[in-house]
Image (spheres, grey):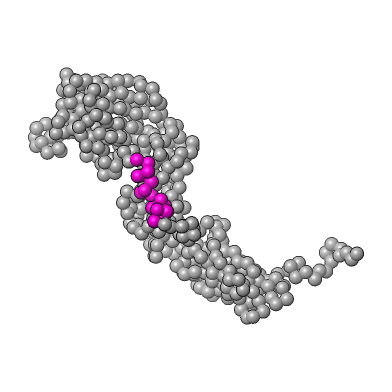
Amino acid sequence: MGLTGCGGPSSDPLAAKPYDAADQVAFSGVGEGHKADPDKPLEVTAKGDDSRITDVTATDSAGRYVRGELTPDGKRWRSTVPLAAGTHYTLRVSTEDAHGAPGRRTIGFDTTGAESRLRVTFGPQAGTYGVGQPVTAELSAPVKDLSARSVVERALKVDSQPAVDGAWHWVDDRHLHYRPRDYWPAHATIDVHANLEGIRVAAGLYGGPSKPLRLRTGDRVEALTDSGTHQMTVYRNGQAIRTIPITTGMPGFDTRNGTKVVLAKESSVRMTGASIGLGNSYDLMVYWAVRVTWSGEYVHAAPWSVGSQGSANVSHGCTGMSTENARWFFDTVRLGDIVKVVNSRGAMMTSFDNGFGDWNMTWDKWREGSALAAGRADGVNAAESARLRPQV
């Protein structure tokens, strides 16, 4: 039996120290001090007939790999996903010669910066909100193409503790909302960020930096406004804590049905008849006003209608109550809390154009507004979905 001592010679070519393969490989679009175009694929080819490429790895400064394909004969490797703009890469190529001896070549290169950067601004501002508060994302430029929307949406991350099943919905070309299937859990922590910087979204458009966002939720506070019984019941974490006599919109000014979200709290606000097309019919200061639509629907103190509260609907669309009850309601709710109106003769609250009516859309319909769900519905298979991912 023949034995080789530790450190002794070996005829195995894989045990040899790799030689410098600079003369065996050529790079397309990189090297010679110029930056690579991120819109063009990265290519490595083997020179001559007596050498072949055995392995290629390309990573960015964050350690993310660029996917690529090596031809069966080992003569060419080509990236299969776009590079990121304004990023440094390290490219490592392994080769072997006609005798099987291993070679290696490592180079570093940079990609050119993006001509246009797509930035994302998340909302609302960091803080504590009610369980109905959607997360919003505003893009600095419109994104219309489905594949580009898919790239953007994959890069927008929402993580919550406890975890929930949620989805993004494209409101229009520049705005997205994120909500769970049901309301957020009480006392949850929600972290939002984007992995979009440097990523190719579309030709000439790359992701820019964005500021992450952290939100928290408080107790689950819901106000159920019943226009038929003229009562509002306020619940905290499922328990009724107060029932309030109210008045809602009179015929012709019926309060909108549906689920609304507290948008703002104003200790005093001026309301005029002119704002709803009634000329100079009234002009007064209203106190302890909780806004639920951008068009001017509030829950507020209405001392002039106390005689009708609990028995008739006499307002111009707002929910009125006594000053004492309005002050209590004002102090109890926070932005993002739920105000749901039922049994009114008014129209249903719209989803996006008058506040946060997101919860009036069914979950299945909500998910149809995701570019990822739309891609699956349009037959985008797993391979195509993988192609759309800029990097993993």
Q: Is residue 378 visible?
A: yes
Left-right relation of 153 to 267? right
Q: Residue furthest top?
A: 307
Q: Residue at x 18, y 26 (%)?
A: 313
- Residue 215 placement: quadrant: top left
Instruction: Please provide percent x and percent y for residue 382.
Output: 48, 56
The residue at 39%/29% (across/down) is: 220
Q: Is residue 86 visible?
A: no
Residue 370 forms part of the magenta stretch: yes
**Place of residue 224 in the rendered image (x, y in percent of width and height, measured from the top left):** 30, 27
Side (left or right) of 8 relative to 38: right
Is residue 115 positioned above or below 195 on the image? Answer: below
Which residue ends up furthest to the right in the rendered image?
1
| In the rendered image, the vertical position of residue 199 relative to residue 361, given as above or below | below
Residue at 37%, 33% in the rendered image: 130
Screen quadrant of the N terminus: bottom right
Viewer-side residue, 86 vs 300: 300
**Residue drawn at x 35%, y 25% as measured from the top left:** 235
In the picture, measured across the screen, residue 7 lies left or right of residue 228, that is: right
**Image position, residue 136 (x, y; %):** 36, 45
Magenta residue span = 362-378
Q: Position of residue 132 (x, y in %)?
A: 36, 35
Q: Residue furthest left?
A: 280
Q: Main secondary structure of the magenta part?
A: helix
Q: Looking at the image, is 215 positioned above or below residue 373?
A: above
> Is 233 in front, or is 301?
233
Check residue 319 for magenta coloring: no
User: In the image shown, does 135 or 68 lie closer to the viewer?
Assistant: 68
Along the horizontal axis of the image, is 324 left or right of 151?
left
Count of numbered circles in the view: 0
